[in-house]
Amino acid sequence: MEPRVRATTYYLQSGFIFVCEICWGWKVLILIETLVGSIDSLLGGGVESRILTHIYGVAGSGKTSIALQCALNCMSKKWKVIYIDADCSFSRRRFLQISSRFKNLDLSHFLLISPKSFPDQSDTIDSIDMLVKEGVRLIILDSVGSLYRCSVGQDREENAYFNKELCRQMAMLLHVSEEFDVATIILNQVSGTSLQKSKIDYIPVAQQVVDPWCKVSLRLERLAEPPGRKAVLEKHYSQPIGSSAEFSPNDLGAS
């Protein structure tokens, strides 16, 4: 017999919260707004807790800006954020630019971790469950494929190991997300292109390893004309697949 479920949606000052009451207890699903209205609509309200959300695109497509807006939105609600800077490209200047939109931020709620190698990334993710116990509501991995791509080569056995290790990292992040009601954003680069129906599609790094673990996948594109950026929903368990929205980058993030 399946458990009976009652669901109620609440709009609170602290954000949009979906509460699902199951017969053996309460499970709270939190939607963290990206603060880009068109993207939040695509996602059904924002980035959801308890799942992995995959956001990928070419350089300069707005991935990091959107992730930082989610992080700062969390911090404005007194929630904590873990930002894993696997690219080693975190810009303090950009962070402060976007944070100027918010008031009374506690910067101690932003934990920045910068792994230097793929094994270091594994160690960071393996210990992340110890960190999320301290009121963390969002984990951002930027980006999942950077150190992985530096590690893979021509040796098939070594590549099989790296694929298995990346798969294990994704499993750990999903476990932490589910166990602690945390939202997790997986940012990713593109590794190449494919031609589908006379249209060029970008392929994310390690797609066959990363994508199966993510319930939501969002592709970001650069446009030649204003507003300059486009988001395409490639995977979602409840929203229309293939729907898209345009947005604009600016000095204070994206809108």
Image (spheres, rainbow, N blue to C red):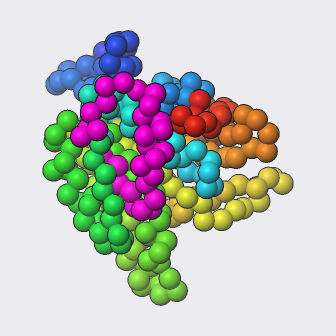
Extreme residue toward the bottom, this view = 155
Magenta span includes 104: yes
Residue at image x 66%, y 57%?
202
Q: Is residue 192 left or right of residue 195?
A: left
Residue 173 percent location from the top left of the image: 31, 51
Residue at image x 47%, y 65%?
146
Magenta span includes 183: no
Residue 98 percent location from the top left of the image: 47, 36
Q: Is residue 221 left or right of residue 163?
A: right
Extreme residue toward the right, this view = 198
Quadrant housing residue 232:
top right
Residue 189 in the image: above or below residue 221: below
196 and 149: which one is in front? 149
Residue 119 percent location from the top left of the image: 31, 72
Please tell me how many numbered marks the rendered image carries.
0
Residue at image x 26%, y 28%?
78
Q: Is residue 185 left or right of residue 26?
A: right
Magenta range: 82-109
Residue at image x 38%, y 65%?
166
Q: Is residue 39 visible?
A: no
Quarter containing the C terminus: top right
Q: Is residue 104 visible?
A: yes
Residue 181 in the image: above or below residue 25: below
Quadrant housing residue 76:
top left
Quarter containing the N terminus: top left
